[in-house]
Image (spheres, grey):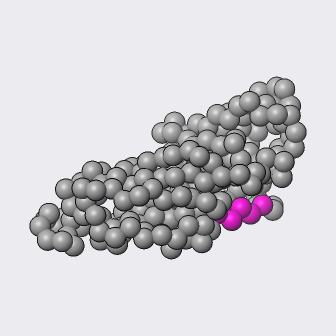
Amino acid sequence: MNKFNPKVLTGLVVPFLFLIGKIDASTIEITVKDKKGNLLKNAVATITSSDLISTQQSTNTATINQVNKEFVPEVSVVQKGTAITFPNNDRVRHHVYSFSDAKSFDLPLYRETSPDPVIFDKAGLVTLGCNIHDWMRAYVVVVETPFYQISGADGRISIDMIPAGKYQLELWHPRQRQTFMQEVELGAVPVSVELVIPTKPNFRAKRRNSGNSGQYRG
């Protein structure tokens, strides 16, 4: 799951894409659900085109905390060039790493002193882990467009102030079987879009309940 590799779901668009109104807007309201009707948190939507891609690196900063032996937030979306810090708020040590093509890095065991920020300088999906706590997983979607947003618990995404034109609407979710991509033409009339996506089970390593003593335990 290390590549953010959008694929057009040829032949599957009709079952999983329902439009309320016409996609011809500078504002898109998106609601993301699974096939059972459950609203999906942490769905990342982006509006992209060749005109929007910039070679410049962002100077933005972001933070992914380690709290109660979990990454917080689980999913982040940042522009290319963003510097992310990984403070450890736990009383045990963590060892943060990624083997993803978009960003490979390793932050050896630390607790009180946070390491230097990591620059996410390549677009794509970065999967994070902790070398000590196998269940800890997080995802960073690195984008090259200024038009992106992530859904909350209500499954809703709002992207506005988009210039009129033709774009690709891309949607990614940690449990999605395939990244969704659909061409859209945006104009002056806001619309609502409901995306119903096929999901896979939420498999993750079982959380251990070991004590706090020892260098490698948590």
Residue 64 at x, y = what percent?
A: 42, 51
Based on the displayed image, in which of its 4 quarters is residue 195 positioned? top right
75 left or right, relative to 93: right
Along the viewing direction, whichever of 189 and 72 lies nearer the viewer: 72
Residue 116 at x, y = what percent?
A: 41, 58
Give the position of the C terminus as an image quadrant: bottom left
For residue 46: magenta? no
Residue 202 visible in this rendered orientation of the protein: no
User: Residue shown at 61%/41% (left/top)?
Assistant: 149
Position above or below: 134 against 194 = below
Give the position of the N terminus as an image quadrant: bottom right
Along the viewing direction, whichever of 23 and 3 lies nearer the viewer: 3
Based on the displayed image, in which of its 4 quarters is residue 120 positioned? bottom right
User: Residue shown at 74%/45% (left/top)?
Assistant: 47
114 left or right, relative to 148: left
Residue at the top extreme of this rendering? 189
User: Residue shown at 66%/52% (left/top)?
Assistant: 57
Along the viewing direction, whichever of 56 and 47 lies nearer the viewer: 56
Position above or below: 165 against 124 = above
User: Residue shown at 29%/68% (left/top)?
Assistant: 109
Residue 155 visible in this rendered orientation of the protein: yes
Position above or below: 36 against 27 = below
1 left or right, relative to 207: right
- How many numbered marks have been drawn onto this rendered protein structure? 0
Q: Main secondary structure of the magenta part?
A: loop
The residue range painted magenta reads 4-8
Residue 66 at x, y = what percent?
A: 33, 54
